[in-house]
Amino acid sequence: MQTQGSNIGWNLHNTYAQLPKTLYAPMQANIVASPQLLLLNEELAASLGLDPAKLQTPEAVQIFAGNHFPAGSFPLAQAYAGHQFGHFTMLGDGRAILIGEQQTPTGESFDIQLKGAGLTPFSRGGDGRAAIGPMLREYIISESMHALGIPSSRSLAVVLTGEKIQRHSAEPGAILTRVASSHIRVGTFQYAAKYRSVDDLRALADYTIKRHFPDIQGSRYIELFRRTAKKQALLIAKWQLAGFVHGVMNTDNMAISGETIDYGPCAFLDHYDAQAVFSSIDAGGRYAYRNQPLIGGWNLARFAESLFPLLDDMPEQQALSSMQQALEEYVSLQKDYFGKGMREKLGLFTEQPEDAQLIDELLQLMQDQHADYTNTFRALTFKDVTEPNLTGAAFDSWHQKWTARQKQEDCSAEQIQDLMKSRNPAVIPRNHLVETALSAARQGDYSVTEKLLAILRDPYAHSAEQQAFAAPPPPSTPPYRTFCGT
């Protein structure tokens, strides 16, 4: 059922629905009896051209609940496949409905998707509805990622459904309205390449180019791969610099747009550990913090394989060489982005040959002494070397080298500190703080979530109010574990 939306500002287009029908399944409403608005991102709403006040009316809440759809929408579930922990399988939107692409006042286009909106033809066990914990978790972390300057899908609203959802225990049901540049994934191409025709694959590739890389000319599909690889290099470098562990870097969770999507078993480092794994099912550490750049390349190789049927206009060896060159560029770019970001976190504007060793030595010290990742860089920013858990002669020696290196910069101490303040956040969505907010929400107290969101909105403010949210968990806290199924 569609509703006009009382001039809320919906301006939906449906370009994805113009692709071959093999790539999606049309959807109907999955009615919930008593939806209630829990969170609304008013800043995001306004940027999309929507009226924040009217989005809080009962009519708008019905849209967020998936009971009605705005005029102009074409609800659908997208088909895709993917390698999950290295094993290929057929997938698809099992609990998400794309209602359309919102055209903003500035001419941009964003997918509007309802996550937890009910069963689809692609649903698997446990799919369909979602519980409040995972939906609030994605809202908190995706909005924090955006504030940190990391490309990400965003969260527009969360509504309660009035239902109980059985996970580890019975939780209130909820639906998240997610906003993304698109939900086209490496897995979308894998699905088209394996299960559909070359014509369908070509239509998907041409659509993706038009939507995300409209200036591409020449070898279109190789350039599509190269541009996607460049975006992934930057994204994963930003993850590493923030100490973010995605946790489930399956190919169906790699967006062509270069945005972070699907916040399942993700978490942020407290003490630095290159081998950190938080997912309860990643027993082998495939998606550990240190492996993320490597897995990004592995996923891109699967993307390249999917595009090969479109490269029949050039000799096979030339096609292979072009793709291999783009993959090598990804590796080089990711290292360059990470190195530049680390230098800036240490207050270095320029690059010197000894910088890589300086960075490696610091990270090894942090690893050996279980130093807090975020707070180490924050303490260095303010010349407070007593705060991080770093002591001894080895750290003193490193600190002397770092101080000498800073003096090589043709900048004032104030300029150096300003750079570091803009690169080293005061706060991140600490795992224990997120869990505290979710526990309170399950009991009907949403004030903890609202307070945490307010604190995370400007992570580089370094305000006095943020100090209480900067502390790592108590030493007695058990190892943090996260779960899929969000």
Image (cartoon, rainbow, N blue to C red):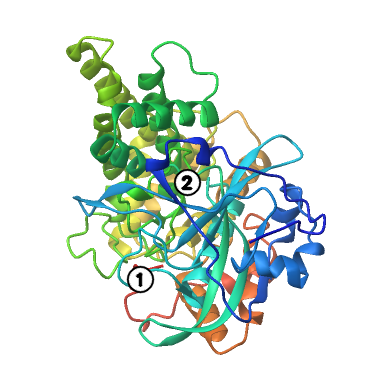
The answer to whether residue 250 is seen in the rendering is yes
Q: CA distance from mark 1 to mark 2?
A: 23 Å
The residue type indicated by label 2 comes to His
Horizontal and vertical percent position of residue 86: 19, 50
The reply, left or right, for residue 119 in relation to residue 466 is: left
Q: Residues within 10 Å of mark 2 (few under 14, many from 20)?
A: many
- Is residue 485 positioned above or below 314 on the image? below
- Count of numbered circles in the view: 2
Which label is found at residue 183?
A: 2
The residue type indicated by label 1 comes to Thr
- Viewer-side residue, 229 vs 125: 125
The reply, left or right, for residue 437 in relation to residue 393 is: right
Which label is found at residue 482?
A: 1
Task: Indicate the secondary structure of the residue bearing disc 2.
Answer: loop
Quadrant for the C terminus in the image: bottom left
Q: Residue at x 75, y 63 (%)?
A: 55
Residue 60 falls in image quadrant: bottom right
The reply, left or right, for residue 312 in relation to residue 203 is: left
- Viewer-side residue, 468 vs 51: 51
- Viewer-side residue, 461 vs 307: 307
Horizontal and vertical percent position of residue 199: 34, 26
Ranked by sequence position, the earlier of labels 1 and 2 is 2
Horizontal and vertical percent position of residue 448: 62, 80
